[in-house]
Image (tube, rainbow, N blue to C red):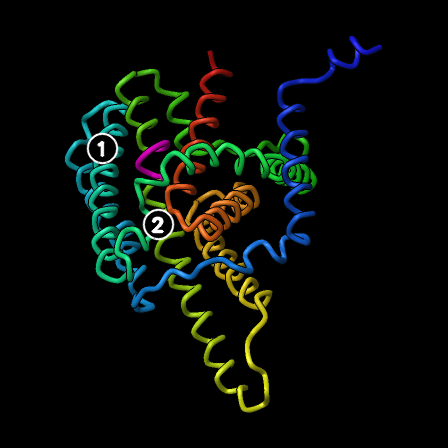
Amino acid sequence: MVKQFVSFISIEDIICLLGLILLASWLLRTSLGRKSLAVSAPRRNNMPIYLPFIPLFIWFGPIPIVIHIVEGLTADLRDWQSIYIDHLIFCIGAIITIAVIIFLARATFARRLKGFGLNAKTIHKDFLAAPVFLLSIWPLLFVMIELTTYFGKSIWGHDYEMPQHGELQKITTYPQLPLQILIIITAVLVGPVLEEALFRGLFQTMIRSYLEQKTEDRRQKTEASSILHYPSSIIGRGTWLSIVISSIIFTMIHQNPAHWPALFVLALCLGYSYEKSGSLLRPIFIHCLFNAITITAVLTQNQ
């Protein structure tokens, strides 16, 4: 009986079980998450509310325009060559956008890049913590995917399947090695660094700072009523609210709504890891690892 039971257990089942154990342990230790960020250290900065929109405009403004112009000039190229050039332009534009974000962070954060969460001394800790964080939410990602598929079949019929991400479609459709390598670099390295620096580093910090300032203003107004301080649970809820709002923004910039539930769960994990550790490297490593696992799984299935 034991052998028969073991034969029905897959690697995916073991991964989900380990993830459930980690998630349950976290929920018990933090009172269902309520106390998880009660003592999260704020990131002191003088960032204006509009500042995160500067790199966002660069990402969604000039870069797509350049790609569109180049596509018109290179219409005679083969499909995979055109896609390669598009990705190359995106990578260059993303690197420029990352440089702009780093410049803005150095200018507006109290401890410059360390205050932003980029500290070489924490690389080893963040690298080791990334798989643990990702493993703990893996069951939730699986549930979101299954629920999305279930409701999709209920609405559009039993033939419904969750559409693949555009990058995964390209990497399986075109076997040319230069294009596949560039897609992997874009998805596993450049994209995660850009998105984490923008949505966690700038947007989440800006939203949290705004909420904390509002909380401080209310605290000062109520001092006369003998309320001496705000409980840490209130501060924690404000931090969680900044994570939720930035996660919604992050989720909605992705084009396929079918991916939104799972992406939202992933974004919550990324935002939480940033606030919990104070290091931007941690969500970057988690994001890179998630994309790498996804691409590896797709390439393995298509071999």
Does the magenta portion include 191?
Answer: yes
**First in residue order: circle 1 vs circle 2:** 1
The range drawn in magenta is 187-192
**Label 2 Cα crowd, 10 Å radius (few <14 / some 14-19 / many 20+):** many
| Nearer to us in this view, 42 or 284 | 42
Q: Is residue 141 left or right of residue 185?
A: right
Image coordinates for residue 114, horizontal then vertical, percent = 30, 51
Q: Is residue 238 left or right of residue 73?
A: right
Image coordinates for residue 60, horizontal then vertical, percent = 29, 51
Disc 1 element? helix
Q: What residue is at 65 percent from the left and 38 percent from the top?
A: 143
Extreme top residue here?
A: 3
| Nearer to us in this view, 170 or 246 | 246
Residue holding disc 1: 88
Residue holding disc 2: 117
Does the magenta portion include 29?
Answer: no
For the residues bearing labels 1 and 2, Cβ distance under 8 angstroms? no
Extreme bottom residue here?
A: 224
Which kind of residue does numbered mark 2 sit on? Gly
As measured in the structure, the alpha-carbon distance from the residue carrying label 1 to the one carrying label 2 is 28 Å
Image coordinates for residue 96, horizontal then vertical, percent = 20, 45
